[in-house]
Amino acid sequence: MSEGTRRRDFLKYTAATGMGYWVSGTKTWAQEADSKSPNERVNFASVGLSGKGQSDSTHAAEVGNMVAVCDTNEATLEARATKSFPKAKRFTDFRKMFDEMGKEFDAVTVSIPDHNHAVVAMMAIKNKKAVYVQKPMTHYVAEARALRLAAAENKVASQMGNQGSAGNGLRAGVEAIQSGVIGKVHSVHVWTNRPIWPQAPGITDRPMGEDQPNGLNWDAWLGPAPYRPYVGSYKNAAGKTFRDVYQPFNWRGWWDWGTGALGDMACHTANLPFRALKLDQVYPTRVTAKSGIINPETYPSWASVIMDLPARGDMPPVKFHWYEGQMEQDDGTRLHNWPPGEYFHGMAVNQSGSLMVGDEGVMYSPDDYGSQWFLLPEAKFKTWKKPEPTIPRSQGNGDLWMKKELVAAIKGGPPAYSNFNIAGKLTEMILLGNAAIRAGSQHPLEYDGENVKFTNWPEANQYLSREYRKGYSL
């Protein structure tokens, strides 16, 4: 019997029976999932090796065997594979990786620009591979729904990489809110100082010309997005020059590829209230957006979104408020787009965070991940004690822990804490805000969540999904 056959039989056996991996003593599933034997380790392929892809692929190799790596940038691929994954086969197109190596790996990490998340993840799911996808799970609302349903149908383990989910502070915050410490919560406020990349109003039209992409497989990088020539620098109408206008980071501000400030940060900053208030149990019924200048190419420089969500059991309806960017004033100065100051009860306002406003107080988290939080006004809660933990706790590095949770799920353990059943719903809600911003309606859009469509303005439905370029599909 070959080593590969023994390993696959082992993984199938443990996934079917759960034997050998049940919690023992103080150990968790993720601790029990660690194994030093190559035959008992999950074989990984990683798509994307820079940015978060660097840590995601490193962690995957730590908890499993790395057998294939893919990056559209040949220099990144060469440097990372040579140094860290010398035995892994290299690719610049994920489709070729699946064609040649699909039988050799059990799980895939997806750490690439947002517009490619869904097509890579869906190929993994349909090939019965477990999948770890960086936030946001997808580029469009309909894609998040499709991945969530496909993962359930194909019974594959999944995890979205919003690493605050592995933070014990966030898990304690969820327990605190659900214990009723601040009473009934009627409103949520989440904000960020982003965008921190060039977009509107500096960039408002499509750059002309074409530059050499210098070792970048541009066609594969574009993936399902409409084709356009690669451009390295851009001079706007005012004569200002922007460097690295598309790559390696500024794609986040372009409609075709990124998900803007909302998609980039809300999977982190909205995670705590989303979980604590059980917003995964419902869909928004109404969404309203206002913003700076909307153009066909780039996200606006600032935006605000309000969503109405219905009651969940004994939890009342809630209004979810999102704030991003800086609003230009009449005198040319810019002010942060933040929640009203009275909610902070005198505490300093951090440049990103979340607030849950209840009828007995406020929970204020002044960081991106929900790991730190305060009950306000502080004097009222000085004697309050945290409830007994009901959510399993992480041990050590939270980002690495998320990969351990995925491996444990592959081997028959419980679903990872940020599995697609909850992460898909979080992503749907967040990207619904982007659809409303892009629609530019500035009046309420009525939303039918079950059928993924706006009912009072059908023209806005074009922003919930996209047609894919030839060669790519779900």
Image (tube, rainbow, N blue to C red):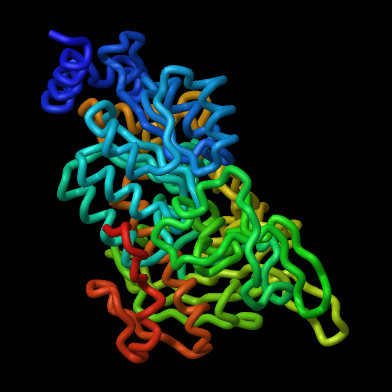
Residue 178 vertical position relative to residue 208 in the rendered view, above or below? above
Quick one: quadrant of the C terminus? bottom left
State the residue in front, 260 or 334: 260
Residue 447 position within the rendered picture, expressed as x and y whole percent measured from the top left: 33, 80
| Residue 271 seen by the camera | no
Q: Which residue is drawn at 43% across and 30% down?
A: 90
Q: Tally the numbered discs.
A: 0
Q: Residue at x 45, y 58 (%)?
A: 115
Residue 52 position within the rendered picture, expressed as x and y whole percent measured from the top left: 54, 40
Side of 107 relative to 114 (left or right) = left
Q: Which residue is drawn at 47% across and 65% down?
A: 227
Quick one: quadrant of the N terminus? top left
Residue 466 position within the rendered picture, expressed as x and y whole percent measured from the top left: 36, 70
Side of 432 relative to 249 (left or right) = left
Side of 386 relative to 327 (left or right) = left
Side of 379 relative to 309 (left or right) = right
Residue 452 position within the rendered picture, expressed as x and y whole percent measured from the top left: 28, 74
The quadrant holding residue 317 is bottom left
Residue 391 vertical position relative to residue 25 in the rendered view, above or below? below
Residue 430 vertical position relative to residue 10 in the rendered view, above or below? below
| Residue 7 seen by the camera | yes
Q: Residue at x 39, y 23 (%)?
A: 66
